[in-house]
Image (cartoon, grey):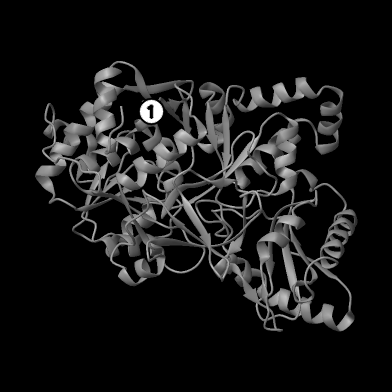
Amino acid sequence: MEHDTLLAYLDQWAEEKSDEIWLRDFKGEGSDDYSWRESRRQIHAVASALEQRFDKDTKILLLSRNRAHWFFADLAIMAAGNVSVGLFTTLNADVAQYIAEFTESKAIFVGEAENWDRVKEVLADDVTIISLPGVDIPEATLTWDQLRSEGEGKSPSHIPKHDDMIALIFTSGTTGRPKGVIQTNDSNVIPIRRGSEFLAIEADPIYFSYLPLSHLAERQVIEFTSLCHGAPVSFNEGLEFLGRDMQRTRPTFFFGAPRVWEQLQQAILAKFGGREAFDAALAANPDGIAHTVQTALGLDRCEFHLTGSAPLPAPLMEWWDSVGISLMEGFGQTEAMSLIISREGARRLGSLGKAAPGVDIKITEEGELAIRADGCTPGYYKQPDKTAELIQDGWLHTGDRFRQDEDGFLYITGRIKDYFKTIQGKFVAPTPIEAQFADNPYVEQQCLVGLGMNKTIIVAVVSETMRDAPRDVIEASVLETVEQLNAVVEKHARMGGVILTYEPWSIENGVLTPTLKIKRDQISDRFGEEASAMAVESAESKTLIIRWR
């Protein structure tokens, strides 16, 4: 049965699957399990209490690691006719303060969050702090259990509608202040239906939640899709237990950004003692090694392996193919989801796939992809000027440059804002160059810089499995890759050298966004001055320069 609100699906499964387990919180060797009926009971009770305490459309912050009560709090806020505003547990105090003040939030649900000590310092005095189960929050004036007791046995009076504003998702953006993207039932239910029909999602999916729920990808693809399909979800206890919890879940669907697939690959190679040892084992027993890898990762019954949020390097895709795991790229964004999807039998190397049925596309004269489809965001919260830029004459402008081949396959060539001009005044598209540089086996993260410079410089992180290689060997290989690229790229985009580092780029050190995209401004801040000097030296000496950091 199809519904036009997420809460209608909750009601359906609470009746049809009342005693079946919906959510499983892994804890050590055990778990806290919640049936559909128990889940709705808690959600309705807390929603009823919230209705008594807050006016309709109140913005309520939500800060916690992925847990069953993240779902519960999110849906209780929604059921009370309010609006949830998720905060990343890696968010710094400045951005948290901006979001809290911009949304005029009146309450915050707090669970396990490593940044709570920073966030609590910037909250206004009138923000009600509500602790979720399993944490001790001295600053809390209310607990989840107190709210549940207040509303026990009651149902909220709010009647959900398809166009209700149910959430604000703040883009993790690589530059500038984040924008609050308005989410409705329509902007989630419609894309889920569109994607599920296109991919022929299996009758009984099993989901695994480990990526930040404050981001729409995990929120929609896991939380809301599990609601629409009546499917169980298991929660990763922590990233250090990722392998254990994936094996216990054995999901039928798994989503990871390219960086996640890269890290899983590195973990497998390390277990084999390095790439050469793995390649030898795979050549000797391809079927056996493929089975071993899939089983070790808990992906032995996974039917769809999705990747997105950043371009997938071709060598990485080919490596996963070699162990029987076909990575399917897709494209969506916080403003519009389920737009472009690859699927079995319709996949092309380097392409994100074809437009999903019901999605009209056009590529503007500037090379920007614009789409027209049902289920897009109505716009940005309290930013009509930005909304007017986003949606023009019924077309949503994605901000991404694309090209389309003769068979309808679409290829992303970079963010419009990522393009930079060299000293010659000509634009450079960094993404395709970075993707080709990623073919080098000694590197795993890379970023091209060159704004206002006479040469571009690529900054790269040495692959974890290659750190024991002699520096001269790494340098020779990397410089050979640069020479090959310089022979094919346009003259103004040619590289003058490479900066190599052993320090991985991460959320913790501020180089990656919470969704694992590289913050180009951070790379420029950290390496820009040195890169500019190298570019000058390279131009004057007519040689490639290499530096270590």
Residue at (54% x, 54% y) in the render: 508
Residue 450 x, y percent position in the rendering: 69, 74
Residue 121 placement, left or right of 479:
left
Residue 100 placement, left or right of 92:
left
Given residues 191 and 530, the one toward you in this image is 191
Residue 104 x, y percent position in the rendering: 23, 61
Q: Quadrant of residue 42?
A: top left
- Extreme residue in the front direction: 406
Q: Quadrant of residue 121?
A: bottom left
Residue at (13% x, 49% y) in the render: 54
**For mark 1, what is the residue?**
229
Quarter of the picture holding the N terminus: top left
In the image, what residue type sits under mark 1? His
Label 1: few (<14), some or many (≥20) within 10 Å? Answer: many
Q: Is residue 460 visible?
A: yes
Kind of element beneath mark 1? helix
Above or below, comparing residue 244 to residue 383 in the picture: above
Residue 18 placement, left or right of 412:
left
Q: Quadrant of residue 524?
A: bottom right
Quarter of the picture holding the C terminus: bottom right
Q: Is residue 66 visible?
A: no
Above or below, comparing residue 328 to residue 461 in the picture: above
Residue 69 x, y percent position in the rendering: 32, 35
Given residues 294 and 191, the one toward you in this image is 191
Above or below, comparing residue 371 to residue 256 in the picture: below
Residue at (35% x, 69% y) in the render: 388
Given residues 487 and 255, the one toward you in this image is 487
Given residues 58 and 378, the one toward you in this image is 378
Q: How many marks?
A: 1
